[in-house]
Amino acid sequence: MPDKYTPQEIEPKWQAQWAEDKLYRSLIDGSRPKHYALTMLPYPSGELHIGHWYAMAPSDARARYMRMRGYNVLFPMGFDAFGLPAENAAIRNRVHPKKWTYANVARMREQMRSMGTIFDWDREAVSSDPEYYRWTQWFFLKFYENGLAYRQRASVDFCPNCNTTLAREQVWGDDRHCERCGTPVIKKDLAQWFFKITNYAEELLNHPKDWPEKVKVMQTNWIGRSEGAHVTFHTERGDPLLIFTTRPDTLWGATFMVLAPEHPLVERVTTADQRAAVEAYIAQTQRQSEIDRTAADKDKTGVFTGGYAINPVNGERIPIWIADYVLMTYGSGAIMAVPAHDERDFAFARKLRLAVRVVIQPEGEMLDGATMSEPFLGDGVMVNSGHFNGTPTANNQAISRVIDWLEAQNMGKRAVNYRLRDWLISRQRYWGAPIPMLYCETCGIVPVPEDQLPVLLPDDVEFMPTGESPLKSHPAFLNTTCPQCGGKAQRETDTMDTFMCSSWYQLRYLSPHYDEAPFDPEEAAYWLPVDQYTGGIEHATMHLMYTRFFTKAMRDCGIYKDAAARRKPNQPPIDHEPMLALYNQGMILGEPMEGSYIAAFGEWQGETLITNKIVVMDEEAAKVMQEAENMVNNLISGLDDIARAFGETEASTPMTTAIGEIIKRNDNVMVIERLNGTEVTLELTEDAPIVDRAGNEIPIKALRYRLGVEKMSKSKGNVVAPDVLVAQYGADVVRGYLMFAFRWESGGPWDSQGIQGVVRWLNDVWNVVTDSPAVDGEADEKAIRALRRKTHQTIQRVGEGLETFSFNTAVAALMELKNALLAARKTPVCGTAAWAESIRTMLLLMAPITPHIAEELWQHIGEAYSIHNQAFPAFDAEIAKADEITLVVSVNGKLRARLQVPAGLPEAEAVALALASPDVQKFINGGAPKKVIYVAERGMLNLVF
RNA sequence: GCGGGAGUGGCGGAAUGGUAUACGCAUCGGUCUUAAAAACCGAGGAGGAAACUCAUACGGGUUCGACUCCCGUCUCCCGCACCA
């Protein structure tokens, strides 16, 4: 054993040993409770980055903790291997996506092994394997059979950069950009495949209780439930015109109707003399949506169609308008406009001078539609509403009564509307699971028979620089025969959204090579559902909605039947929710960096310094140089004053330098901040040398520019490579640091210095375990008790920390225990049984967090392999209890004294001690306290005078 | 606008209504060294010579006692947003 801690030696050694022994193989074992821990699988982008470590290593620590707690833990890993970057790489570098992807998978798998996790690699699943996507396709067929998949022509979101349609969930932000690449999306009219996630809108609102409030709220917002009524109006010509309203009690106040410009009825209601205006408006709306929706002012615009509708409740004839504030994608794409009681309708009516009629009159106020300056949204009583006049609106009673009446009259019915749209799963790209559907000349849309799955992606494809899917021009793939009539048929060339692959991967891990079904019902019955899921919040309304939908849809397709039948009656259902508990970790951001300090020499051209030489220096040198420059310039101007006195007219040129920190840089233009805070723009001439202080020429790329806290990206140069850290410090240090330096749920900027604290921690642990010679003398009983107490307090704190994802406090507790051991090492406590027990316990507590050093030192102290098969230490409250405590004495709520007293002191004695203390006496003028608050277990005494 | 979350030293961050600032980074002083780094020992919330006083975004409140609970304000982050 080396006498120094050398993770580079011990880590690979133990990783190999654990793999050889299949230490972390997870097999069904009915004698132990199971724990399915899952962390979101990565996309094989090429390199494992620090974000992967941040997501995986703490999850691993917790899974290990559960394992030590006696659970049979499954913690699998795989790859979400279909997707666009592979295809883009193919176009750019002429590498086949398959080759690129599998090379990355191999590389990242190796990188992950260096992390020292308990991943059971025998359960690995890769979504682009035919044995995997066969089942992705199979799910599509099942959903299709059960009416949950349909093809429809619709106006859909399309990313021009990714060259594919997107689901509504993948369009983000007010500028409606592509979630993946940030490009603003455009609308296209295409026939696409959808999944009926809207069927489950109501059910999806009912979240698993152990999910973060934030995710529940985001999903709830996304689903956007609102209650109201569907009411059928009719156009004057008799066409039914359905609207949704949350305020049926204001039906009598509808003074006009508004249709979305895309509404199918627009064509029919528009009159000849309005046609030109309507068409112009529609064209304008379409153009607007394509250019920039964000810039669209909130000013209402719209055009009268010339048509009229009849309000069913009062037979009134009201004009039909079109306006872009009514969206085709929400409700029925048509509204009744009640300007008196709706902000948007009010704004529209005022702008276009339309009638406003009050139908809810507030108490003690007389609203007048002609003069009111804002709509009335509060409660009141119904007026101008036929036999409903006088009905109070409070507590929704008017709404409820009106709906009852509408239903009785057959004019409308109670309805719930959702903002959620069906999931668009078609992608016009090659590297995905082909949608297993055919288009037959005679039979129409025909599903590929189950026994013909998988529909394989052909390997021999040509990638177009345009990004167009090569499947469209691949005759062998494209042309096939119809399984129904044997005639000619063409394959669907769209592939599936990769979120389909990840909607069920937790099931494939159970039996990645099972070929009778997507998963082995035996395994599913034992392991499902996932007990603890971890991953980033960015998937709140995408993956996390889709996978919940999948589970419910699978249930309704009967896919869980075999597995569910094997469950015991008292177990939670496996087909309601895929993941019982969820925890979102934060993100590691880039480390802020100072820019290089430079002195630039050149000629001024206006505000810009045309620079022909740059010298790089540190901040101190820059300050010195700046002072020197100031002095020289003062001197020059002083000399000029003298020269002028002698009749000289031309002033000398001051030094042409700019000194400061680079704050921006691109190619040959940079901005520096001078030491006095002003900014200067430099433009480098083509062959301007950049030299360091030793005179060596360096490339411009070596110049750093100031960087704030930002997301890591290669172009900013703030990426932290875990491989480099592992090589330098070892995996245990990296794991420990990631768990210690941040609150896991928050993440934060990387700090390259902070990692030293964890290096010191593990070095100290190594030393205290391997090099603690017994100290002569009789060990003090009190000191022994103190060490045992600290040890048991640490058991509690580490256990709690791992339990609640407070990894930072768990590590802090271990550092404290280490500090206590370092202090005790110099005393005769070192070498006692209590000492040995404390060391042993510390290693066990460290095992989930820093598994390699724990294993190595476990072996060193003579314990049997493997520490990772040990039970988590049991906490003994009796031992953890203090026998002497610091009694904190407050007088009138202000802290006045700290007294060392035995634990469990009776109140009377505590008060007597406190009153006797000079620190307390200073603040009391004799007399007895009016009130005494004594919290013995907290060591707290408050005396009120 | 609606909804959610957060605000504690120079920094990351600890604190079941009960010793605010644990643990760590950085900083400062010391030891060792020709020197530096590393390592080790020690000191750091602010003000004050001290006694003490003031400090958990700000203003109130509840309480013997508030970072923690309640009301209001400000700031920042996130989601949704003409949603009928």
Image (cartoon, rainbow, N blue to C red):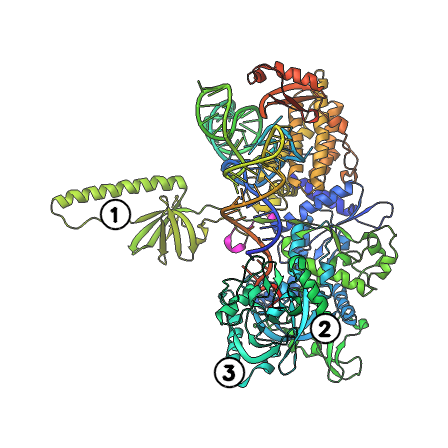
Pointer 2 local density, CA inside 10 Å: few below 14, some 14–19, many at least 20: few
Can residue A114 be seen here? The reply is no
Q: Which residue is mark 2?
A: A409
> In which quarter of the view is residue A632 placed?
top left
Image x and y of residue A578, in percent? 75, 56
Q: Which mark is residue A480?
A: none
Image position of A97 (left or right of A298):
right
Q: Name the residue at 62% across, 70% down.
A: A252
Q: Is residue A273 left or right of residue A399?
A: left
- Give the magenta part as a residue range: A713-723
Q: Are marks 3 and 2 on the same chain?
A: yes
Q: Which residue is more in the foreground, A534 or A453?
A: A534
Q: Amino acid at mark 1?
A: Pro
Considering only order in the chain, which callout, 2 or 1, is on the residue closer to the N terminus? 2
Which quadrant of the figure contains the N terminus of chain A? top right
Q: Earlier in the sequence, mark 3 or mark 2?
A: 3
Q: Is residue A26 visible?
A: yes
- The residue indicated by pointer 3 is A276
Q: Position of residue A721 (x, y in %)?
A: 58, 49
Mark 1 and mark 2: Cα distance apart in space:
92 Å
Q: Position of residue A852 (x, y in %)?
A: 70, 40
The subunit letter for the residue under badge 3 reads A
Q: CA distance from mark 1 to mark 3?
A: 69 Å
Q: Which residue is mark 1?
A: A654
**Considering the numbered disc 3 on the image, is that residue within a helix, a strand or a loop?**
helix
> Per the image, is A765 magenta?
no
User: Looking at numbered disc 2 in the image, what kind of residue is underneath it?
Assistant: Gln
Sort mark 3 into few (<14), some (14-19) or many (20+) by Cα contacts within 10 Å. Answer: few
| Disc 2 chain ID | A
**Residue A9 coordinates in the image, percent (x, y):** 67, 40
